[in-house]
Image: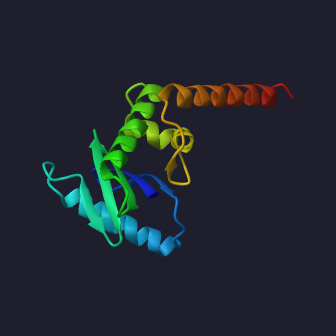
Amino acid sequence: MMQFLLLFSRQGKLRLQKWYVPHTDKIKKKITRELISTILSRKPKMCSFLEYKESNIVYKRYASLYFCCAVEQEDNVLLTLEIIHRYVELLDKYFGSVCELDIIFNFEKAYFILDELLVGGEIQETSKKDVLKAIAAQDILTEVGNDENYDI
């Protein structure tokens, strides 16, 4: 089970975070700060896996963003890497070559896509096509809701 997912920039700015295991805000900030500094200090040719407390950390850099996940020790780190890649593919399909600004200005969509892919830290849907259908349906509902607000 995934414990959390963090998205941060090369400058160390947190862009998105999703926690599947409860922690206090103080502990979340501590974990985030430690992991960002650790990952950013690693050389590009180093392995994308590391141990952190009782978890395995899996991360991958795409352009200017780092995608970082914590999973339990007995979980498959290669599968986690594949989940990160699937999330990036979905973001790319939706935004058309996703970039950091897409995440900043459309964070609610990024969260929605993540929620369609993962529920409670477990993979919910493996089909990119089905996830994109759900996102398109939600976009239509949002547009209809916005149109009704302007009719008043």
For the residue pair 41 and 48, the one nearer the viewer reads as: 48
Q: On the rendered image, what quadrant is the C terminus found in?
A: top right
Residue under the image location 76 percent in, 25 percent down: 147
Residue 5 location in percent, x, y? 43, 54
Residue under the image location 39 percent in, 32 percent down: 89
- The correct choice, above or below, for 64 with respect to 41 in the image is above
Residue 85: name its quadrant.
Answer: top left
Observer able to see residue 66: no
- The correct choice, above or below, for 39 with respect to 44 in the image is below
Residue 33 location in percent, x, y? 35, 67
Looking at this view, name the residue that lies furthest to the front.
74
For the residue pair 118 and 145, the one nearer the viewer reads as: 118
Looking at this view, name the residue that lies furthest to the right.
152
Observer able to see residue 52: yes
Residue 113 location in percent, x, y? 53, 38
Looking at the image, residue 45 sits to the left or right of residue 101; the answer is left
Residue 79 location in percent, x, y? 35, 46
Looking at the image, residue 73 sits to the left or right of residue 27; the answer is left
For the residue pair 67 and 40, the one nearer the viewer reads as: 67
Residue under the image location 37 percent in, 57 percent down: 75
Q: How is the image coloured?
A: rainbow
Residue under the image location 32 percent in, 62 percent down: 56
Tally the marks.
Answer: 0
